[in-house]
Image: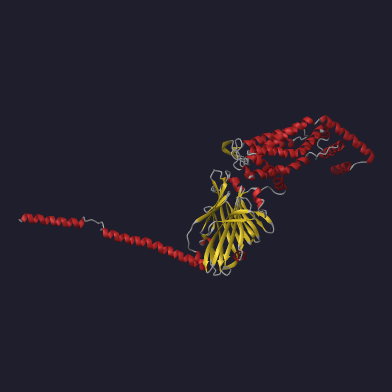
Amino acid sequence: MDRNQAIGFGLIAILLLAYSFFFGSTEPTQQTVQETAKVEQLQTTTAPAEADSLVQARRTAALGNFGAAATGEESTTTLENNNIRVTFNTKGGQVEEVLLKNYKTYQGEPLILFDSESSTTDIAFTSNEGKRVQLSDLYFTASEVKEVAADDKKGKTITFRANIGNGQSIDQVYTLYDDNFLLGYKLHFNGLAQQVSGENLTFTWNDNLKQLERDLQHNRSKSTINFATVEDGYDYLSISDSKETKSLNEPVKWVANKQNFFTAGIIAGSQFAGARLTSSVDPADSTTVKTLASEILIPAKDVVSGSGGEFMFYFGPNDYKILKHIGHDFDKNLDLGWGIFSYVNKWIIIPAFDFLENYIGNYGIIIILLVLYIKTILFPLTYKSYLSMAKMKVLKPEIDAIKERNEGDMQKTQMETMKLYQEMGVNPLSGCIPMLLQIPILFAMFNFFPNSIELRQEAFLWADDLSTYDVFARLPFTIPFYGSHVSMFTLLMTASTILYTWSNNQINTMQGPMKFYSYLMPVIFMFVLNSFPAGLSFYYFVSNIVTFGQQAAIRYFVDETKIRTRLEENKDKRKEKKAKGGPSFTERMQEAMRQAQEREQQKRNKAKK
């Protein structure tokens, strides 16, 4: 090898060493990669395991003697019948979801009345160690679903058990009977009488009501917490948008979260020790109707006793046929009005409506037949009222003459008018009394139609849902007190009311401002009822048409000439009676009024002097 070759090989060696030093691969060897992966895997598996173990240890320690039930597997199971499907979660052993099978939301989706996203229930108590224990912290084991039968009723039952150890356990037993909306609930602490401290357990229910109906504002106005105390019975929180809290320091029978057409409630087998109820609403929140929160005190002695505490859940419609069988005023979750209006609905309207519903599937036709039924009952009163107005019309010339003769003197005009009525044998109140007797039915409808679940999502003509307002046209703006839609049934009702008022004004003696107000009232009601259920407006429209027809028929058969002749005969008979027996009580009252008027006039004359 010569000198040049040696120098060349030396330079090549130097270049190779430099390249390997500055540009060598930075990738680890396969062995290094595997070792690194093992370390990372060890870290990722060890850290969560240690964290879970630490959390579990803390949870067990926090529950004290009940820590044995702090571990387990979470799963769901169901009970169902033809009406509802109830889903339970083994973590807590509580109701997780309730589906009403035969109903839909206003959007046509399955109606879930209760779910874990919007509604939660829990039961908490204090152990003898002073620790707060919640059933939601405990894991329960679900038994197999079993068939049960009692009092000719068949159903299914399931038991959730949390084992505490040493033969101690907490049992929650649910029973769902066929064709029912009631879910039986039994809570039993086995062998834990010495482990529970305090007089009461606390049942909490937080419910963010979901919108189930199209009209959110109407939905809110019908949603609240209803309850019944053992001593005073039914009561409720107000339906206003302001927050309200009520503490009940007395035994309570039931508490219910009530909406337009559906209710979810809990009923005590014996009684609750008390409750704290709260209702609130955020007007800006269009996803939640209202937020209802209840803290209900369950007597501990009932739960730790040999039989355990017994309760009943209700998840279902506000249907009077169903609610009336539950008892304890639970049917008042259906608002049928107060006092006499409620009885009119229960004894007259609902039986007739249910009867027609058994044979007719179209609810518009049912409303028409309901009107005919009511008008037939009220026809004697309608006839008497019309006859009274006809008598007043016959006497109108004499009444006008009295007003003209005593212009400006209202007291004298009234006295002479009453004298004329007395001479002719006319009772001016006879036309008012029949109308007053019809008012209970008139106002009972204001409670029946907005709360009748039978009309929910039932279509008729252009109305998609008779339980809410019909939208014949949408307005591009909002009219104060009217809204942004046009209800055609309300317009028809208004037009028919004006027609009915005009017909009445042809035969009565109403004059001046009162006549103007009689036409103003239908217009006011047009604004009021524009957002009311279409079924109500349609009922009043048909009622006005039928009443107008009845009056036309009565007018055809009533001869005003004969009425005048009869009044003249009454006048002659009263003259003869007066000649024989002296003045009547009415005449003596009129004479007393005349003397009082004269004394008042004398005082005025003296004051002027």
Image quadrant for the N terminus? bottom left
Counting from the top left corner in percent of width and height, residue 336 is at: 67, 47
Counting from the top left corner in percent of width and height, residue 509 is at: 78, 34
Quarter occupied by residue 378: top right
Residue 418 appears anywhere in the view = yes
The residue nearer to you, when weighing 207 against 189, is: 189
Residue 334 appears anywhere in the view = no
> Colour mode?
secondary structure
**In the image: residue 437, left or right of residue 139:** right
Find the residue positioned furthest to the left: 2
Counting from the top left corner in percent of width and height, residue 132 is at: 54, 65
**In the image: residue 427, left or right of residue 480:** right
**In the image: residue 441, left or right of residue 468:** right
The residue nearer to you, when weighing 86 against 267, is: 86
Residue at (56% x, 60% y) in the render? 172
The residue nearer to you, when weighing 127 against 484, is: 127
The residue nearer to you, when weighing 59 against 75, is: 75
Counting from the top left corner in percent of width and height, residue 571 is at: 88, 35
Quarter occupied by residue 542: top right
Number of marks in picture: 0
Image quadrant for the C terminus? top right
Residue at (59% x, 45% y) in the render? 217
- Residue 101 position (above or below residue 136): above
